[in-house]
Amino acid sequence: MHDIILPIIVSALVAAAASLLGSFAVLKRMALVGDALSHVALPGIAIALLLNINPFLGALVFLLFAVAGIWAVQNKSTLPIDTIVGVFFTSSLALGALITPEHELLEALFGNVLDLGWVESLTSIAISLLLIALVLKIYKTITLNMISPEIAHSVGINTKLMDLLYLLIFAIAVAQGIRFVGALMMGSLVIVPAATAKNISKSITGYMRWSMAFGIAAAVLGIIISRLAMLPPGPVFILLCSIFFIITFIISIFKK
């Protein structure tokens, strides 16, 4: 059992970072944007596999360029961000499907955190901790910017720059999560724990904490169950998240 301790730590921290960022995506009604962004990374993964380099690096570089492109188009267009992301999403998905090596496609789509080496694992831990610390430091600014950009601008916040910063942080979290649950299900890693937390939360800080808690709980249980049942961890994690959502939804109904 000692050989799954590191994957458990990695998965818990990656899930915590993704769930924390997902809480803001749900707050701004951008949940599906997170799902679409995960598919945007697919060509980057494919190029990395073709060049025989770390898929995380390929996903990250492609996502950062895509986020910069989305942000630039958003500021020069009247189209809503979900529409712009949708254009990038469909184009990237088609390109990724064409160039991803067939024998590597399954792992790119579904991920497997149990295959990570020590260097990748420690890198993921460090990046996740940095993302969590950064978001917790600026969460009030992010929240104000999402709830009311006009008020945020009036108090001196550069709303455009804050949008870009959030998207960049989001892209890093997505790139990491792809190694856990894959490009196909990464959106669930972002969306479902946050949606679950929203069922029972009464304050923004409680909402953020519960989002992280549900993400961590599903990640830890997912790794343990997947090892015991010899199943891929990504789908197990998503199913656990869905079960948590159903339970909290039922609780929220009886509380009304």
Image: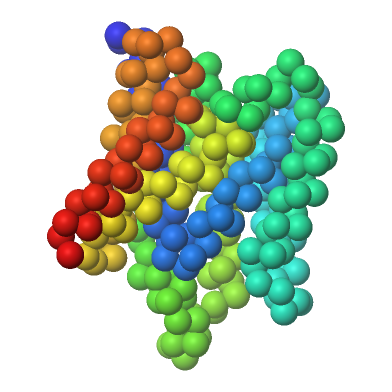
* Horizontal arrangement in the rendering, residue 117 relative to residue 48 (left or right): left
Residue 153 position in % (x across, y down): 50, 86
For the point 67% across and 38% down, the residue is 59
Q: Nearer the viewer, residue 1 or 136?
A: 1
For the point 40% across and 32% down, the residue is 239
Query: Which quarter of the image is occupied by the C terminus?
Result: bottom left
State the image quarter where residue 105 is shown: top right
Task: Reply above or below: 186 against 131.
Answer: above
Residue 37 position in % (x across, y down): 63, 50
Task: Reply above or below: 181 against 85.
Answer: above
The number of numbered discs placed on residues in the rendered structure image is 0
Q: Is residue 66 visible?
A: yes
For the point 43% across and 34% down, the residue is 238
Q: Nearer the viewer, residue 37 or 250?
A: 250
Residue 137 position in % (x across, y down): 36, 61
For the point 80% across and 41% down, the residue is 94
Name of the residue lying farthest toward the bottom: 154
Q: Nearer the viewer, residue 218 or 168?
A: 218
Q: Is residue 6 visible?
A: no
State the image quarter where residue 159 is shown: bottom right
Task: Reply above or below: 4 against 124.
Answer: above
Query: Which quarter of the image is occupied by the N terminus?
Result: top left
* Horizontal arrangement in the rendering, residue 67 relative to residue 194 (left or right): right
* Horizontal arrangement in the rendering, residue 139 relative to residue 55 (left or right): left
Name of the residue lying farthest toward the left: 255
Residue 235 position in % (x across, y down): 47, 28
Task: Reply above or below: 73 against 169.
Answer: below
**How was the colour assigned to the protein in this rendering?**
rainbow
